[in-house]
Image (cartoon, coloured by chain):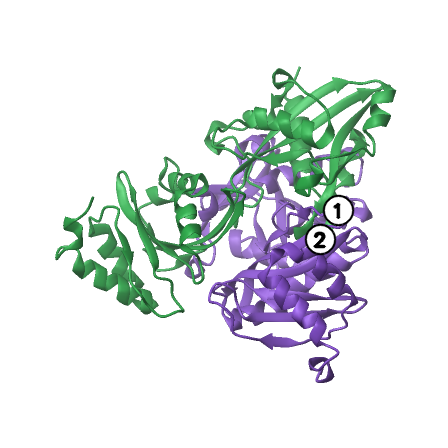
Chain colours: A purple, B green
């Protein structure tokens, strides 16, 4: 790897970086330096004051200037490595540099990224929190760069017709962030790098409601969005990278099955996912919950229906 | 304050707590202990290994057992104090203990909260990240308790009629979390504790689009939700406390004004809010963006119209 990069050719860039980390006033200086800098993947560890971390790594990006990534105060070395190596972070870098990415705009410059925290779900990174220092070179203004990263997810609008009425199947579970039990569409995060949205959808529905649906019966409502949108829905793009796909399932059931679904307790109890199933008349659905996923699914469904996109 | 609490009555509980922090297997012990414990607001600081923080505070809650709050590794004392004292954290505790709160369920127990990080926006807390250790006492399972806290916000569906067509007014801005420029409804976070949703809505619309709307012309679409939902929409309740209200504005404009709005660059540039305004025919709106706020607003608007709730 970059043995040569550690000698004289490297040093001017390195010293500018260190001095910049201690003196934020020279932010503009570092922009020019890092763009001209030809560092490859380099790991540096130097002892500094307890208030700033000593962990830092330059992440190489084909076709772009490398990105300097530092660890926030108190972040352990394993957490730092897990963060940089995980798919959430790689995907974010890909988005930033991609065809419609922010960094394709010449005005915008990424100075560095600070990994603030990592939440492990077992052996994989579940949530990541980081802060990107990004400026608009024209005005010198800093662009808000705090990211809560959790990656892609799916949500399912399951409509069951019974006795001439249509019902939606919802889950009710503890949601600590909002401090309440709430009704939501069955949903789940993609927990591997396979990008298998519909597979995850079918699995989550079964885990959360007990209903075994077939992949071929799921209609991807988000695929009706214009291609330029990326065909995913962002619940909270100002702070979070979450990217949702919505699937529709329509089926018929008898009265018995409907009664059995109501109030059923399912979910992976041992993983803290105590989930109750609710069945709500579709006509009342829009008013019944505080879940944005419900409203998004209704909009996609109603608009797709209106435009004759659903048989 | 609790001078007496610092003497012998206090110590058995204290030693259990310290041993639990070092040995997670004894978590069930702490549940029983803290519920019987009658600590008032007590501040302890003891030096421990660098890997765990020495900052901890017990927050008193009227009618409930006090909550122990600890600082995550590397969190500074000012950040820790800001976190505990800020309205985001107080609101979360209120929700947890409120009428529909999670802690009103006897099975559920809050062991402690760890403040992981604080993002200051100037002198106030902008974002907060914390981890609540919560268990289902019946099964012993831990309930997912990671929270990215940003508080309430508003979003506006602005529909302008011109030449027989209806257009929606959108903003386009850099969204670092998703790595792209995206089209969204004009929106903004409530940045004070006044709870003034409609006032924030009018102000954000003016800052982001230049349009000066009147408070009395804004219709609160979220007020059509059933009362038991809390009449707010949660974009991502599995990880975030964000609570959205949607407002509708309908007006008529001439062709000139419409042209002028298109491609206008507004926003508080010096605060990194470089915003372009876009005007999109309402009939195409649902397909045109990846913003969940757009789809939620469409659902609320279309359903409210359908049910005769809008004149």
Left/right placement of residue A130 relative to residue B30 reads: right
Quadrant of res B224: top right
Relative vertical location of residue B88 with respect to residue B219 in this rendering, above or below: below
Q: Residue at x 73, y 84 (%)?
A: A4
- Check disc 1 and report the residue beneath it: B181
- Left or right of A160? Residue B109 is left
- For the point 84% across and 26% down, the residue is B260
Q: Which of these two is toward me, B93 or A105?
A: A105
Q: Residue furthest left?
A: B8
Q: Residues within 10 Å of mark 1 (few under 14, many from 20)?
A: some
Task: Give the camera-side residue of A133 and A87.
Answer: A133
When the figure is inspected, residue B115 is found, relative to residue A61, above or below; the finding is above
Q: Label 2 belongs to which residue?
A: B179
A82 or A102, nearer to the observer: A102
Q: CA distance from mark 1 to mark 2?
A: 7 Å
Q: Are discs 1 and 2 less than 8 Å apart at CB?
A: no
Q: Quadrant of the N terminus of chain B?
A: top left
- Asked whether residue B48 appears in the rendered view, the answer is yes
Quadrant position of residue B158: top right
Where in the figure is residue B210, as x and y percent of width and height?
A: 73, 27
Q: Give percent across and percent down for residue B165.
A: 83, 23
Above or below for B145 versus B103: below
| Residue A9 image-quadrant placement | bottom right
Give the label on residue B194, or none: none
Q: Visible in this render: residue A192?
A: no
Q: Residue at x 46, y 66 (%)?
A: A50
Secondary structure found at label 2: loop
Q: Do the dots labelled 1 and 2 sit on one chain?
A: yes
Chain letter, disc 1 residue: B
Label count reads 2
């Amino acid at each position: 790897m970059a043995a040569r990069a550690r000698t004289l050719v490297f040093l001017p860039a390195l010293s500018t970086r260190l001095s910049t980390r201690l003196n934020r006033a020279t932010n503009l200086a570092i922009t020019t330096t890092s763009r001209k800098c030809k560092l490859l993947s380099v790991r540096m560890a130097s002892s500094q004051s307890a208030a700033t971390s000593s962990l830092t790594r330059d992440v190489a990006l084909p076709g772009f200037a490398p990105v300097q990534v530092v660890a926030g105060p108190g972040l352990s070395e394993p957490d730092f490595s897990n963060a940089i190596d995980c798919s959430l972070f790689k995907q974010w870098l890909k988005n930033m540099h991609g065809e419609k990415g922010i960094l394709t705009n010449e005005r915008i410059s990424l100075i560095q990224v600070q990994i603030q925290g990592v939440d492990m779900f077992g052996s994989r990174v579940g949530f990541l929190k980081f802060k990107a220092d990004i400026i608009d070179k024209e005005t010198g203004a800093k662009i808000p760069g705090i990211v809560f990263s959790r990656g892609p997810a799916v949500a399912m609008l399951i409509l069951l017709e019974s006795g001439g009425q249509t019902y939606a199947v919802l889950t009710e579970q503890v949601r600590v962030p909002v401090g309440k039990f709430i009704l939501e569409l069955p949903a789940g995060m993609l927990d591997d790098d396979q990008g298998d949205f519909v597979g995850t959808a079918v699995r989550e529905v079964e885990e959360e409601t007990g209903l075994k649906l077939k992949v071929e019966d799921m209609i991807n409502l988000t695929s009706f969005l214009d291609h330029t949108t990326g065909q995913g829905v962002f619940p909270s793009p100002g702070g979070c990278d979450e990217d949702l796909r919505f699937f529709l399932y329509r089926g018929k059931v008898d009265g018995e099955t409907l009664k059995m679904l109501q109030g059923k307790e399912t979910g992976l109890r041992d993983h803290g996912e105590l989930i109750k199933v609710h069945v709500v008349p579709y006509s009342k659905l829009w008013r019944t919950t505080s879940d944005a996923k419900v409203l998004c699914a209704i909009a996609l469904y109603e608009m797709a229906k209106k435009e004759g996109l659903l048989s």
